[in-house]
Image (cartoon, helix red, strand yellow):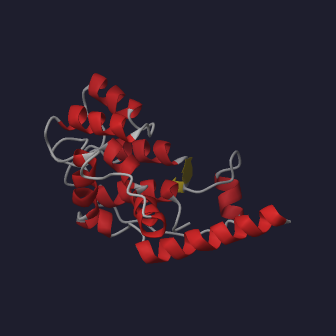
Amino acid sequence: MWASPFALRAKLALSFKGLSYEYVEEDLKNKSELLLSSNPVHKKVPVLIHNGKPVCESQVIVQYIDEAFPDAGASAALLPADPYERAVARFWQLLAAVETLEGALKECSKGKPFFGGDAVGYVDVTLGAVIGFVRVGEALHGMRLFDASRSPLLDAWLDRFAALDAAKAVLPDTGRLAEYAKMKQAEWAAAATN
């Protein structure tokens, strides 16, 4: 599903690792047998099928990609090698308040451009998946989640991350995503009146 931030996490991890893959779009109103048999518990996207075996849930997929392809990509690893730093990165995957994320970026990056330091890491991929919706919120509602006055590090991070070729290759078009969001809002409003 092109608009899913969860599917986008998997696509970002694959892109930053420089891995080629076949992307299969799923109709969530008429789920395919492949999806249902690959994720029989939740019946949701994303699902990564590697060597004929399904891996489900976006954060699990990101970790799997990182472990299954340790030497792939410019940064090589999305999660740090050090167990403590890896635990800290996994902790920050829980999207907390912006102020907390601002502090996390300062702590994890150690003054470097990304949560992972000089290169994109696990938290960058996890948070990067919501960039489209951050931009849609701004476009539709004038709400800027990350702004230079309140969260200057995150504001700069968003622009830096979104400018990377691997991110540009998979981030959805803001206009298309905004139209999708408007359509879903209209559907929810219509369902609420019935």
Q: Position of residue 137 (x, y in %)?
A: 46, 62
Where is 75 relative to 81, above or below? below
Left or right of residue 174: residue 79? left
Q: Residue furthest right?
A: 194
The residue closer to the viewer here, 40 or 105, is: 105
Left or right of residue 90: residue 117? left
Q: Position of residue 186 (x, y in %)?
A: 68, 71
- Seen at 68% across and 47% down, the residue is 42
Q: How many marks are shown on the rendered structure?
A: 0
- Seen at 42% across and 38% down, the residue is 97
Q: Position of residue 120 (x, y in %)?
A: 25, 49
Identify the image quadrant of the C terminus: bottom right
Left or right of residue 182: residue 76? left
**Visible residue check, residue 182:** yes
Where is 186 relative to 73, above or below? below
Where is 135 relative to 153, above or below? below
Where is 71 relative to 133, above or below? above
The residue closer to the viewer here, 35 or 117, is: 117
The quadrant in which residue 171 appears is bottom left
Identify the image quadrant of the N terminus: bottom right
The quadrant in which residue 99 appears is top left
The residue closer to the viewer here, 180 or 16, is: 180
Q: Residue furthest top?
A: 84
Q: Position of residue 159 (x, y in %)?
A: 25, 60
- Seen at 21% across and 36% down, the residue is 106
- Seen at 30% across and 24% down, the residue is 83
**Visible residue check, residue 29:** no
